[in-house]
Image (spheres, rainbow, N blue to C red):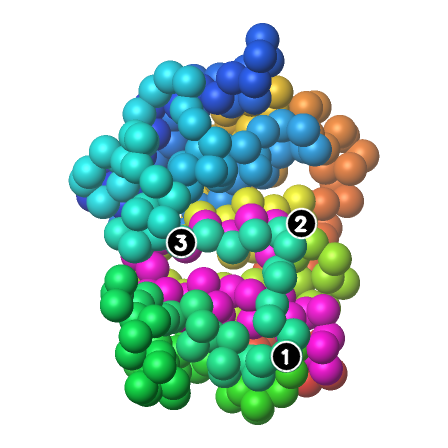
Amino acid sequence: MAYNDSAEPMLKTEGLTVTFGGLHANDGIDIVIPTGSFVGLIGPNGAGKTTFIDAITGFVPMSQGTAVFDGVSINGVAPHQRASRGLVRTFQSLELFEDLSVEDNLYAAADDPPWWGFLADIFWPTRLGNNNDVERAIEVMELEEFRDALPQDLSQGQRKLVGVARALAGNPKLILLDEPAAGLDTAESQLLGRRLRKLLDSDMTVFLIDHDMGLVLSVCDYIYVLDFGRIIAAGTPHEIRENPAVILAYLGTEAGEMQEAGAHAARQELDDPESEDERDM
């Protein structure tokens, strides 16, 4: 089930297993995410998606298997060290700094001070993170008009965009998006999809985990399907839509037809950057 073995993988796992007591939350997961690709992971509630992301980013230990990021094993590496190497994630809970502007939220994420940074703060309190990374994140997520706004004054969709931009401000090599469309309506999800595809124009690799089938099928180049901790299918969006195991285990026949219609509508919206939904956002 490997994807594009000819390309240099940005992330590769082999036999990744996470065990809680006698429960295999992840059981022998093999995935390949090539550099510069947009890969998705879907699965029903309780399938083990977030556990997998937690294992990749170091927030839960792997019981077995290996994970290699940018050609180097990250087994046993602390979460902050993985992030400093360019493996950055978002969280389902945004936890933005509500008393800081959008721009300052991004600067806080971009700032990676040395051990003596607290001394510099005493004499240079306005010291900020990398301006280029912040500006790129604002541009990619099209947040120019909101840079001075407070998060509490934004819509849920706009807050989600800020959450992604904050991760981008850390200048990642691979960004892992954990349920970025949660709580969004159809129009907001479609807008998010358009912005996410732009990440590929910024020399970035993207791994998207989300329940929104219309979003995942419309923006990802390749998709893995997780159920009961195991990969049960992998392929292009077309192959996933047609896969009987996916329809049975994740969608159900009737739901599969509904999601196909939703994905078709989402693809049409993504092809129309001047859609009414985006103008009304």
| Tag 3: amino acid | Val
Tell me if I can see residue 42 in this picture.
Answer: yes
Instruction: Nearest to the eye among marks 1 and 3: give it.
Output: 1
The vertical placement of 14 against 44, above or below, is above
Label 2: which residue?
212
Q: Determine the CA span between mark 3 and mark 2.
A: 21 Å
Q: Position of residue 219 (x, y in %)?
A: 52, 56
User: Who's the residue at 30% across and 75% down the image?
Assistant: 119
Tell me if mark 3 has few (under 14), some (14-19) or many (20+) residues whose alpha carbon lies within 10 angstroms of its own.
Answer: many
Label 3: which residue?
88
User: Who's the residue at 51% across and 17% down the image?
Assistant: 19
Mark 3 touches mark 2? (CB < 8 Å): no
Element on which disc 2 rests: loop
User: Who's the residue at 57% across and 90% down the image?
Assistant: 148
Q: Is residue 89 left or right of residue 146?
A: left
Q: Is residue 104 left or right of residue 274?
A: left
The vertical placement of 153 against 186, above or below, is below
| Tag 2: amino acid | Asp
